[in-house]
Amino acid sequence: MRLPITAWTSISHRITGVILFFGTALLLWGLDSSLRSPEGYAAVQDCLTSPLAKLVLWGLAAAAIYHSLAGVRHIIMDFGIGESMEGGVLGARLVIGLTAVLTLIAGAWIW
């Protein structure tokens, strides 16, 4: 069985929601550590300069971008726009394409 692109987009929207849920805990921990003391701020700053931390931040940014765009797509569909199969496929392709472009821009900003 082969799933249509609209199904993959919907499944990915849910997966990115879970990633953001757990990623928020990581980001809140970093915020808490950075606000505790000047030493904590320096430690978080040093941590964020590592390639692994930048990769994690880039992944969280990509998840946020995709989740936001897919959410906007769902809201637009709630207004009755793009509810046909052709409209759904076009919307899914737009979400994927815009996510790729915005993720590359976010990667350039983070790195």
Image (cartoon, rainbow, N blue to C red):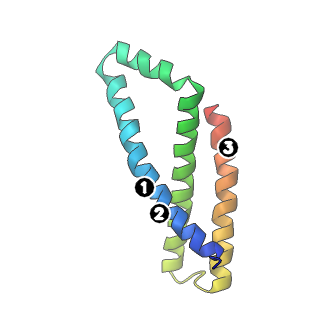
Mark 3 closeness class: few <14, some 14–19, many ≥20 residues within 10 Å: few
Q: Which residue is mark 1?
A: 18
Name the residue rendered at 43%, 22% in the picture: 44
Q: Is residue 39 above or below residue 9?
A: above
Q: Which mark is residue 64?
A: none
Mark 1 vs mark 2, CA separation in Å:
7 Å
Measuring from the top left, give residue 52's x and y in whole percent.
Answer: 56, 30
For the N terminus, which image quadrant? Answer: bottom right
Between marks 3 and 1 in the image, the one whose residue lies nearer the viewer: 1
Give the labeled residue for mark 3.
Answer: 105
In the rendered view, tell whether residue 54 sits above or below residue 21: above
Find residue 92 and report its horizontal and vertical position in percent: 64, 70
Q: Are marks 1 and 2 in contact (CB under 8 Å)?
A: yes
Tell me which amino acid carries mark 1. Answer: Val
Q: Tell me, yes or no, whether the two marked residues, 3 and 1, touch with CB atoms within 8 Å.
A: no
The picture quadrant where one finds residue 55 is top right
Of all residues shown, which one is farthest toward the left? 36
Alpha-carbon neighbours of circle 1 within 10 Å: few (<14), some, or many (≥20)? few
Residue to which mark 2 is pinned = 14
